[in-house]
Image: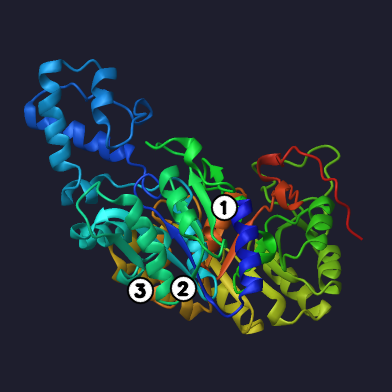
């Protein structure tokens, strides 16, 4: 993935106006065909009333989809049944039912495809040895799989074989490269799990500009057939592909839990624009302090330092940063926060208020909206998730009530099931969405590829030199050191 990122950047620099394309094989490259083998063989058991494959697990399958007879020998299937099982498998593996129900992508590959589809004047093509007769089913299944990732393939980017299944695959691959070049794309990379296919396409690359990437999954040709310069890899690691400087500019990033000096120092040294502060009232001094956990559930520890809200507001305002205020209590906390914000003269364009509906209610949110009509005003709506998916009219009715109170953004927890569907639905309704509780760099990049309006994360990303310590929830923070100091 790192080589691919470097090669793409170089190609874009050298050809700034060209339509760039990366080509992906499908079976064994995008799709993990072990799922198809498992599904079809267990279907054989159901049809025959047997249990030869009932205990078969994905990790037990180490054979190519064209060589399941080798699996029968490994599993010691009776010789007299192997012919019947093989015939069943060959008949059903490309049935519409199997394509719809058993096709699953390798981890990370859809995110890689999504990233390239988002880049300016860049396209993802599909170059497969599947016969033309499977065109409609292939597009349907891939677009169904891609929906969760916001990936979609148009018919024009799919090149298939003109011959029957398994015949002339290498020739079909070369024809695919030439086809896309002829219609105006500059093919800069090819991903395929078969070395012999890569070798054939490399030989046809007369301009020597295509990076050959071997998806080292399960393949039938010899690894030694990989062309010179081909790059091998076993995982689609988006943390190696997507760099911080290539992130989508119109997603707002929020550093969660800037409640202590270590987090503040890291945040100010970063390119992240928004800092989230957890605001509470210190029961001992009645001052506004920064602390995620309630004093009731987690009493103040001996020696615990509680930064004053005013001190952090002053520093963040001085550095021109955006300030997200997560108000943990009602009453004097809200009044005190509004007073401090006014004293510092922080403009609405750099203010963001977050609170729970149960904490502030209509009166509290309307009061903030009156004081700061142009600021971001947000509440989490995880409690509406079942309604958004199951009773959307009722969910929208509630969201419209909240919007009438002044809220202009809603927050969804990354851990909520079906969060992608929830995000899609809310965006179709015209609501801005923040994703929060994003735990690590991989999840952060996955969230960014969905293009929500904003993402809130701890930024504990050592790969990027960030060592966010978290908010201190339940008195804990990340244990690794914070080596970077900020002036």
90 in relation to 100, above or below: above
Q: Residue at x 46, y 48 (%)?
A: 199
Residue ID for mark 1: 238
Left or right, 132 with reference to 8: left
Instruction: Determine the secondary structure under disc 1.
Output: helix
Question: Which of disc 1 and disc 3 is earlier in sequence?
Answer: 1
The answer to whether 158 is drawn above or below residue 343 in the figure is: above
Q: Name the one closer to the observer, 427 or 360.
A: 427
Q: Position of residue 462 (x, y in %)?
A: 73, 47
Q: Which residue is mark 3?
A: 397
Decide if residue 294 is on the left or right side of residue 309.
Answer: left
**Helix, strand or loop under label 3:** helix
Q: Which residue is mark 2?
A: 185
Taking the spot 12% from the left edge, 35% from the top edge, the residue there is: 88
First in sequence, mark 2 or 1: give its number: 2
Local crowd at mark 2 within 10 Å, few (<14), some, or many (≥20)? Answer: many
Residue 405 locus on image (x, y percent): 50, 78
Q: Residue furthest left?
A: 48
Residue 411 visible in the shown view:
no
Residue 404 x %, y %: 47, 80
Q: Residue furthest right?
A: 487
Q: CA distance from mark 2 to mark 1?
A: 24 Å
Sequence-wise, the earlier of marks 2 and 3 is: 2
Observer-side mark, 2 or 3, equals 2
Tag 2, which secondary structure?
Answer: strand
The label nearer to you, 3 versus 1, is 1
Q: Are marks 2 and 1 in contact (CB under 8 Å)?
A: no
Residue at mark 2 to residue at mark 3: CA–CA distance: 47 Å
Q: Look at 52% across and 43% down and name the residue there.
A: 235
Asked whether 274 or 232 is in front, the reply is: 232
Q: Is residue 299 above or below residue 157?
A: above
Residue 487: percent from the left, percent from the top?
92, 61
């Amino acid at each position: 993935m790192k080589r691919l990122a470097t090669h793409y950047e170089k190609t874009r620099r050298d050809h700034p106006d060209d339509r760039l394309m990366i080509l992906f094989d499908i079976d064994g490259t995008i799709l993990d065909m072990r799922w198809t083998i498992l599904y079809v063989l267990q279907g054989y058991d159901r049809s025959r009333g047997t249990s030869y494959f009932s205990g078969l697990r994905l990790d037990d399958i180490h054979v190519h989809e064209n060589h399941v007879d080798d699996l029968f020998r490994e599993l010691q299937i009776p010789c007299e049944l192997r012919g019947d099982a093989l015939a069943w498998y060959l008949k059903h593996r490309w049935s519409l039912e199997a394509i719809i129900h058993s096709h699953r992508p390798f981890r990370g590959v859809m995110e890689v495809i999504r990233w390239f589809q988002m880049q300016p004047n860049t396209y993802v093509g599909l170059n497969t040895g599947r016969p033309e007769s499977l065109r409609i089913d292939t597009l349907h299944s891939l677009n169904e799989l891609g929906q969760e990732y916001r990936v979609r393939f148009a018919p024009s980017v799919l090149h298939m074989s003109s011959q029957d299944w398994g015949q002339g695959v290498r020739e079909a691959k070369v024809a695919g490269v030439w086809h896309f070049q002829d219609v105006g794309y500059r093919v800069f990379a090819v991903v395929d799990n078969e070395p012999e296919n890569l070798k054939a396409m490399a030989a046809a690359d007369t301009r020597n500009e295509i990076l050959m990437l071997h998806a080292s999954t399960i393949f039938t040709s010899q690894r030694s057939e990989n062309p010179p310069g081909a790059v091998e890899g076993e995982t689609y690691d988006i943390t190696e592909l997507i760099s911080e400087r290539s992130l989508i500019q119109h997603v707002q990033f929020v550093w969660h839990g800037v409640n202590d000096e270590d987090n503040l120092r890291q945040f100010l040294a970063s390119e992240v624009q928004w800092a989230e502060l957890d605001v509470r009232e210190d029961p001992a001094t009645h001052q506004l302090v920064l602390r995620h956990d309630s004093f009731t559930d987690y009493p103040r520890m001996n020696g615990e330092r509680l930064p004053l809200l005013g001190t952090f507001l002053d520093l963040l305002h001085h550095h021109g940063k955006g300030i997200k205020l997560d108000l943990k209590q009602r009453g004097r906390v809200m009044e005190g926060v509004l007073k401090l914000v006014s004293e510092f003269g922080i403009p609405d364009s750099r203010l963001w208020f977050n609170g729970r509906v149960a904490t502030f209610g209509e009166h509290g949110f309307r009061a903030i909206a009156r004081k700061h009509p142009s600021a971001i005003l947000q509440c989490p709506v995880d409690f509406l998730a079942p309604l958004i998916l199951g009773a959307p009219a009722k969910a929208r009715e509630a969201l419209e009530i909240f919007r009438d109170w002044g809220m202009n953004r809603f927050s969804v927890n990354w851990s909520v099931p079906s969060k992608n569907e929830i995000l899609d639905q809310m965006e179709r309704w015209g609501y801005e969405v923040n994703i929060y509780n994003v735990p690590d760099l991989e999840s952060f990049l996955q969230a960014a590829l969905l293009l929500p309006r904003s993402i809130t994360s701890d930024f504990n990303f050592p790969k990027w030199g960030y060592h966010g310590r978290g908010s201190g929830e339940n008195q804990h923070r990340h244990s690794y050191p914070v080596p970077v100091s900020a002036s």
